Image: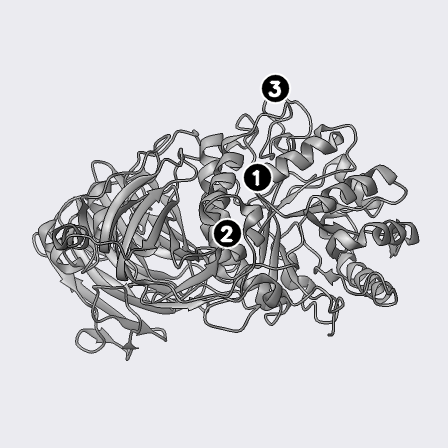
Amino acid sequence: MIQRRRTAPVAPSARRRRLVGAGVALTVVAGLLAGGVAGAVPAAAGTVSIPAAAERRVVTANDLIESVGVNVHTYYNDTAYADTDRVRSLLQGLGVRHVRDGLVADRPDEVAALRQLGAAGIRSSLIVGGTKDASTQSVDPAQLSALTQVAPYVDAVEPTNEYDCSGDSAWAAHQRAYAEALVQQLQSSDELRRLGVFAPAFCRPGSIAQFGSVQGLASVTNVHTYSGGAAPELALESRLPAAAKAQDPSLPLVVTEAGYTDATAMSPTQFAATDATAADYTVRTLLDAARLGVARTYLYELLDEKPQAANTDPEQHYGLVRYDGTVKPAYTAVRNLLADVALGSPASVAAGAARASDVTSVRGGGSLLRTLSITDPAGGGETLALWLATPVEDAATHDRVADTSRAVRVQVSGTHTATVRQPSRGNAETSVGTGTGFTVPVDGGVTLLHLAPTTATTTATAAAAATTSCTAAPGYATLAGQLGAVASSDLARGTGWSGSPVAATDVPDGVTGGAEVTAAGQQRRVGVPGSPTSWTIALWERTDASAADFSTFVRAVGASGAPAGGFVRTYDTTGDAASHVQLSGYGLPAAGASYGTETFGQALAGTWHLVTLSVGGGKATLAVDGVAQGTVASGAAALTGVEVGALSSGFRGAVAGLTVFPKALGADDIGRLATTSPGSCEATSAAKPTSGSTAATPKPTTKPATKPVAKQGVATALGISGTGPVGR
């Protein structure tokens, strides 16, 4: 396998090179084809997108169960996969119905294993890589013969895996020619033409755009996405919509590889995560992918293949289960998730019609709040998944981040009885009460709020208590005043602006005004009284995909003008995906230095973020959405003003809600500032769910989810089974 890369791709290992050369792509993705995860909101099925602030995806329990797959390697007969009975038992215990595997010619043992899984209700998607001679890939008749033997249990096939890392300088042309030949062979076979075809998957994110459209080659688009040891949302939300657009936005999309290695002794160690953190992030990966409209996500992988006590080889530590058969926390967390939404055994859940959610609004938690509504298999209830897209572990040290929850207010139509569980943190059930509104603490571990409509007689007092157990949070401007702000501006277009920006749209909840920066020269300066030497600048900003690299949009101004530091700019807006923006912030120059020290943060293009730069005590901290991104040494200088807008000619986007404090705000205050929202809750009276360990950090502000949109089932969204591979 390839060492999972988060920045520059890593060259394939010797074993992966042999497998690519043999035409057997290993990376496995189980079939999405037989029913399950829906399209996007509110677009047509197959579209992958980030739901707007006022929308919340709704899927059925069967949709979510169908959206989960796992990579296996049944032909690795010198590894833990040699025991097919154990593989089957673990998959059934997990509650998944789909696996992804590589198909090898002349391996009757693999055929037998795949048929055994199929008989147990576990369907396969198979990589059919053909043969390779010099620079030519060819369809292998022996592989097609094996495919025919297992076809009744197969959802889809996939051409050579991660061929962009094969060393072939003409990989794109050769991959395309092979994919076309494979499709032709499938369509010429009565037994195989019903199978879906996944697009090729690549090891380098940039290869997706380089390869281009898969129209005529595939019925499902396909992406690999790994986050190293980091939280999964940035990689998913920046890469997947861009990948779908590059391949074919009209087709459903599958993620055939996503996962975490717990090889924390590897180098660099930040590409790994501890078992507890992997449990949190794995559940978040599955739910966020479903929230985006991904039809199926195949976790990589089921088993650690071989023992490796030194914990230095990442490839031996991606499993949900250890080599000796003991399950890791991530396995337990996924099993809990699927059982919780199934209200019992996932195997007993059948496809059902989507219906509207009873949730009418979700307030609080900030721009890092993520939600997904999952309707019950029967009975009219639903589960609302809530979590904050925050780190729960320091990737460099693997220390857990202090657990800081945010209160989220959920309103429902009609009286419901509510309970909460955290599947990655013990899964103990806690009662929240009965009523029409509930306050729930939410952090970096997914919280499942189950809502059951009740016709039972409840006293008015009990219902009212559950409905009103919320201390209203102050709005952004009010809280800023409480925290001691000395300068503020809504940055509305007009007074004080040079150039002619237009009014900003869709500003964060509780924020007013704002300006859309559309051209060079559109700038504004806001004075700061008192000339503080310790300070915090807070600004809501949205970087557009058209913004240039190295474009400053906020800058501190001192008595002698703008210092060589104390500013924030875009750093790299296209290096990973067009919707992923790196930011850089600078502290002030130390005595005798010509420039301040730089630190970096991450953001999504087209999304509002609260960006703060705090200077004081000899250091500067850049935070995005209430989460510290980096801290560097900093000098001091009296702050007399703040400039915003296109301070260098290439910034394009929007700014709003500028606030300045005469002190370096602490992490908790920045977190509150980022997450406060009128109508949300400042504190919660609901019981905190049982947590197995610590978690999150401060977090930010999102608009209420007031427009639930139902998704279609996976079978409808994918439209594959019984339809032929492409062009139908």
Q: Which of marks 2 and 1 is nearer the N terminus?
A: 1
Q: Which of marks 1 and 3 is nearer the N terminus?
A: 1
Closer to us: mark 1 or mark 3? 1
Q: Residue 645's spot in the image, x, y percent? A: 30, 67
Look at the picture and state if 654 lies above or below 637: below
Residue 274 visible in the displayed image: no
> Looking at numbered disc 3 in the image, what kind of residue is underneath it?
Ala
Residue at (88% x, 45% y) in the render: 105
Q: Dot 2: few (<14), some (14–19), or many (≥20) neighbours within 10 Å?
A: many
Look at the picture and state if 225 lies above or below 712: above
> Looking at numbered disc 1 in the image, what kind of residue is underneath it?
Leu
Q: Where is mark 3, residue-wise? A: 309
Q: Residue 150's spot in the image, x, y percent? A: 81, 50
Q: Dot 3: few (<14), some (14–19), or many (≥20) neighbours within 10 Å?
A: few
Q: In whole angstroms, how far apart are the C-alphas of marks 1 and 3? A: 25 Å
Q: Residue 64's spot in the image, x, y percent? A: 52, 54
Closer to us: mark 2 or mark 1? 1
Residue at (17% x, 64% y) in the render: 526
Q: Which colour scheme is used?
A: one colour
Look at the picture and state if 204 lies above or below 315: below
- Nearest the eye: 700 or 29: 29
Q: Where is mark 1, residue-wise? A: 94
Q: Residue 110's spot in the image, x, y percent? A: 81, 40
Q: Where is mark 2, residue-wise? A: 235
- Nearest the eye: 23 or 473: 473
Residue at (37% x, 48% y) in the render: 387
Q: Are marks 3 and 2 in contact (CB under 8 Å)?
A: no
Q: Is mark 3 on a helix, strand or loop?
A: loop
